[in-house]
Image (cartoon, helix red, strand yellow):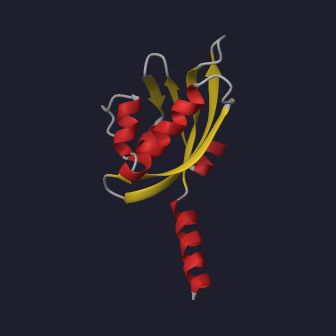
Amino acid sequence: MTLEASQAGTWSWDAVANHGHWDEQCRALYGMQPDEPTTRTTWLKHVHPDDRVRLLEHLDQLAKPGAGMLWTDDFRVLHPTKGQRWMTVLGHIDRDDGGWAVRFTGLNLDITKRKEAEAALAERERH
């Protein structure tokens, strides 16, 4: 019920096999088609081009031993019908015995309204 109320989408990604699972809500948040493969490449295709390099660098750092067990980040996606949307990711990282990331799991929330409100407030404060 909590996931439904928050409209959060859940996902998991096997970093070794480069295969994941996104629930129906997560696919809807990104505007993914039901037949799109659940890979890192597919996910990146939906991420705003200006945020891709930063996210990839962050993920590469998170994959290394000693990087912790949590992943949180805000980034933009390009939804095919809704246009630019802001997402926040709250994730957990499973690691092998050597400390390398083997699985990421978590949820995405659409925070577009919050980002728009923050931008409007910042604009008012400048004037």
Q: Name above or below for residue 41 compared with residue 96.
A: below
- What number of labels is visible? 0
> Residue 36 at what x, y percent from top left?
31, 32
Nearest the viewer among 63 and 40 is 63
Quadrant of the frame with the C terminus: bottom right
Q: Residue at x 39, y 39 (%)?
A: 44
Task: Residue at the far bottom: name it.
Answer: 127
Q: Name above or below for residue 62 compared with residue 80.
A: above
Quadrant of the frame with the N terminus: top right
Residue 107 shows in the view: yes
Q: Is residue 80 left or right of residue 55?
A: left
> Residue 107 at what x, y percent from top left?
57, 39
Nearest the viewer among 95 and 31 is 95
> Residue 64 at what x, y percent from top left?
59, 25
Q: Residue at x 49, y 22 (%)?
A: 15
Q: Residue at x 53, y 28 (%)?
A: 12
> For residue 43, what is the image quadrant?
top left
> Residue 78 at what x, y percent from top left?
37, 52
Nearest the viewer among 114 and 28 is 114
Residue 1 shows in the view: no
Q: Is residue 57 left or right of residue 101?
A: left
Q: Is residue 72 left or right of residue 27?
A: right
Q: Is residue 26 left or right of residue 88?
A: left
Q: Residue at x 42, y 40 (%)?
A: 27
